[in-house]
Amino acid sequence: PSMRCVASSPVLSSRLPFTTPPTQRCSTQTLLKNNANGCSGPVPGFDGRKFQAACNEHDKCYGTPGISKTQCDSYFKKNLLYTCSKFLPNCYASAQTYYWAVKIAGESYYDAAQQAGWKNCAQ
């Protein structure tokens, strides 16, 4: 890892209560390079675009060097449930489905994002 990785304040969605923690992270410019692609897979009967901000925050968390997968997944779940509580009160089952999908099947995505995050940090 490069010394260009520095502590910085979050530059992420201010609408969500849980954003990527300001621990070891890259510069703002590097963080913005991280690829956030929304919610990768649909849940039948639910419009996943409702969770777009939470999914993008989760993607950014995965790509932030030094953040654990467990921490990213935990914040993801909290953001999904927050979204339901504020905007979509009938979506809790879908939120749980999204959370368990990343918890169970997200390891390879996390590993790839961490690798890319450190690579971007070194540039």
Image (cartoon, rainbow, N blue to C red):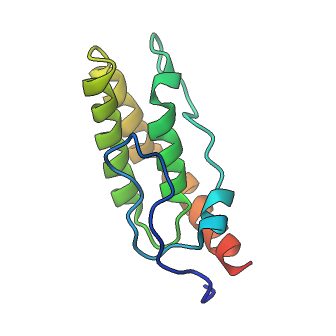
- Residue 47 on image: x %, y %: 49, 16
Which residue occupies the foreground of this view, 9 or 108?
9
Q: Nearer the viewer, residue 101 or 85?
A: 85
Name the spot of residue 122 as percent of width and height, x first.
69, 80
- What is the quadrant of the C terminus in the image? bottom right
Question: In this picture, is 48 found above or below 40?
Answer: above
- Quadrant placement of the N terminus: bottom right
Residue at x 38%, y 64% (from the top left corner): 21
Tell me: 13 left or right of 30.
left
- Residue drawn at x 45%, y 10% is 45
105 or 41: nearer the eye? 41
Q: Is residue 122 above or below residue 100?
A: below
Residue 71 falls in image quadrant: bottom left
Question: On screen, 39 above or below 48?
Answer: below
Percent position of residue 77, x then y:
32, 41
Q: Residue at x 42, y 46 (%)?
A: 14
Q: Is residue 12 left or right of residue 33?
A: left
Which residue occupies the extreme top position in the image? Answer: 45
Q: Nearer the viewer, residue 10 or 47?
A: 10
Question: Could you tell me which residue is drawn at 48 percent across and 37 percent down?
Answer: 53
Image height of 14 relative to 51, above or below: below
How many numbered tags mark residues here? 0
Left or right of 54? Residue 113 is right
In the rendered image, the residue lying farthest to the right is 123
Q: Position of residue 31 (x, y in %)?
A: 60, 63
